[in-house]
Image (cartoon, rainbow, N blue to C red):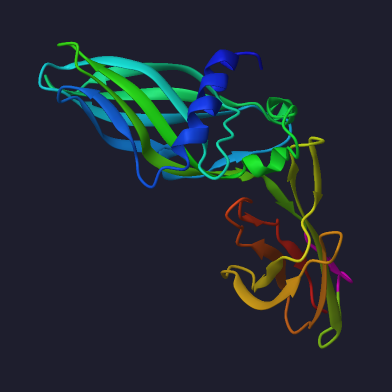
Amino acid sequence: MRRGIAALAAVAAVGAAVVTAPAAHAEGRGDIRVVRTVVNAGGSVIVGVKNVKRFPIVMTIKDNSGVKGVAHVSAFNTANAHGPVSYLGTSCRRSSSTTSVCTATMEIDPSWIDSYGSGNEGWDANAVAGTWQVNATVQANDKDYWISDRIATFKVKRAATLTTDAAPEPVRKGGTLTVAGTLSRADWTDLRYHGFTRQVVKLQYKKPGGSYRTVKTATTDGRGNLRTTVKASASGSWRWAFLGTTTTMKVVSTGDAVAVK
């Protein structure tokens, strides 16, 4: 949890200036460049309330003399410059005389997110979620170097859970089936899951051996709870599906099989 604290302080200081800029900023000398960057294999970085999340940033780097390595990588939220993430180092693989593929390992510890900005007035740990940018300093064998901001953007999202409970089981044919559930998401302030309110969630059904299809939608209440009714016409499984938001992951519940008698 203490790793990378000095680096994080530097990231926050630089970030305040970077996020006001209209476009990516870079400086250095020579022809070395990061030509491609992929964060977490192209997926969002999902952070819960307990487990430390490690994720890779893979950079393809080119220089006519060959790539010496990566001096530093940082990342932070583009809207507020918050970046409670540790840079654990980089390994590089040479793919040609001019090109190397370097993988940086980053780490977000949910137990440290709130304390990261606790000295700031109005600090909200959950504001860390959203669109982040990647910055990197790369070096070449001929002493060329390049400091680049925003070589890629990615999403950091709050983890979510979703449950389904259909009753009664079994249900008579033509009878009323009540399908309930709860949508919750991670809160990085108290490291607990709380109901995600006023969210539209899809109710899906499938016959045995079939595929799920959406039959209706419902909105979570002030506690994140869901409840709706459907007419029971055939046996099958029911589940809730949430498409996610820009700051919260998408999630699908486990199906609840109901027999129609």
Name the residue nearer the viewer: 177 or 210: 177
**Number of marks drawn:** 0
In the drawing, does residue 216 fall left or right of residue 21?
right
The answer to which quarter of the image holds residue 91 is top left
Query: 129 above or below 236?
Result: above
Name the residue nearer the viewer: 70 or 91: 70
Quarter occupied by the N terminus: top right
Q: Position of residue 211 (x, y in %)?
A: 56, 69
Q: Residue at x 41, y 39 (%)?
A: 41
The answer to which quarter of the image holds residue 2 is top right
Query: 210 above or below 196?
Result: below
Residue farthest bottom in this picture? 174
Q: Position of residue 137 (x, y in %)?
A: 34, 22
Q: Position of residue 23 (x, y in %)?
A: 35, 45
The stretch drawn in magenta includes residue 165: yes
Q: Position of residue 161 (x, y in %)?
A: 73, 50
In the drawing, does residue 36 fall left or right of residue 113?
left
Residue farthest right in this picture? 168
**Magenta range:** 164-170
Name the residue nearer the viewer: 142 or 190: 142
Q: Residue at x 42, y 37 (%)?
A: 39
Quarter occupied by the C terminus: bottom right
The stretch drawn in magenta includes residue 160: no
